[in-house]
Amino acid sequence: MSWLTEFVRPKIRTLLGRTDVPDNLWHQCPACQQMIFHRELDTAKKVCPHCGHHMRATAADRLNWTFDEGSYTRIDLPKVVADPLKFRDQKKYADRLREARETSKQEDALLVAHGTIGGHKAVVAAMESSFMAGSMGAAVGEGLVAAARLAVLQAAPLIIYTTSGGARMQEGAISLMQMPRTTIATQMVKEAGQPVIIVMTDPTTGGVTASFAMLGDIHIAEPGAMIGFAGPRVIEQTVREKLPEGFQRAEYLLEHGILDMVVKRAELTATLTRLIALLTAHHKAAA
Ligand SMILES: [Zn+2]
């Protein structure tokens, strides 16, 4: 790779208004439009080195970044009834599921793994936004219950990375039932004396915000993450008022007491390590 292709070509293409730069080589920051070389982006954990914009990350990225040396054991999640309502809109739900599985190489919108974070054992559940917008159906609900059970069994904290468009409409009432189920899941971990730490990433909305995402002991969000229940347009139409600047963004929510902290991705693992050490200290003292 020469200096010319690495650094000059994308700029020229940008000037010419062309965007056909190979995806695997360069990324354009959606916030500042600057071009970033993919290796640089990987090292920066998908954070723009120019403006600090936190780009969306996959569930696998989350696990790799969170666990010590990127080493962890994934657990198989319970199988659920596929397409219980035989739902179809423009497309059959069964087809949507198949396509999402092919592109994401995941069974559904959640991965669960266990390992250590800063030397402390932990269970991590991470949602995948590219899988049907990270929507929560029975599989995600069952997966979170499985994650909670594992945390109880291992006497380990549960860390959940959320990113979701909300309940999965193709599963109707069954997706709504996952709200109480995931609520119970977080409760199980707390009753076992283990902390539940929620890391909200962009975007966290709908039924996920209205259930387990707001039920952690500690609520962390990534900078700039959109977090809310209904979208801003729906709220504006309902309350007939203009919403304030930055409404539903992590920083605004921190100021208004919804979140405990907004943490940059680069500092997240260190923060989690510190929190786990603080919140589980009483177990060590008692032992
Ligand atoms: Zn940027």
Image (cartoon, grey):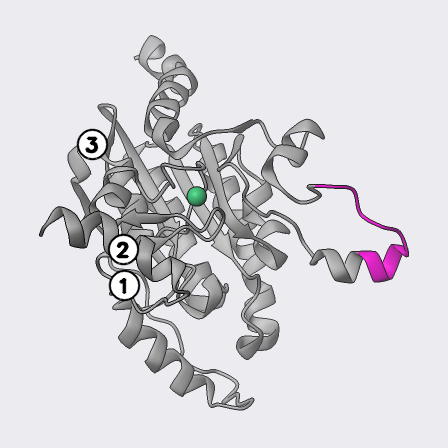
Task: Point out residue 281 in the picture as x, y percentages from the top left corner.
Answer: 37, 14
Q: Nearer the viewer, residue 153 or 113?
A: 113
Mark 1 element type:
loop
Distance (Cα) linking label 2 and label 3: 28 Å
Q: Are marks 1 and 3 in contact (CB under 8 Å)?
A: no
Mark 3 element type:
helix
Q: Nearer the viewer, residue 197 or 243?
A: 243
Location of residue 178 by image quarter:
bottom right
Query: Which corner quadrant holds the C terminus?
Result: top left
Q: Are marks 2 and 3 in contact (CB under 8 Å)?
A: no
Distance (Cα) linking label 2 and label 1: 6 Å
Residue appearing at x 60%, y 50% in the figure: 209
- The rendered magenta stretch, by its main secondary structure, is classed as loop
If the picture is divided into quarters, which one holds ligand 1? top left
Membership of 166 in magenta stretch:
no
Q: Which residues are magenta?
A: 236-245
Q: Amino acid at mark 1?
A: Asp
Q: In the rendered structure, which disc, 2 or 3, sits on the residue that comes first in sequence?
A: 2
Q: Nearer the viewer, residue 71 or 178?
A: 71
Task: Point out residue 18 in the picture as x, y percentages from the top left corner.
Answer: 37, 67
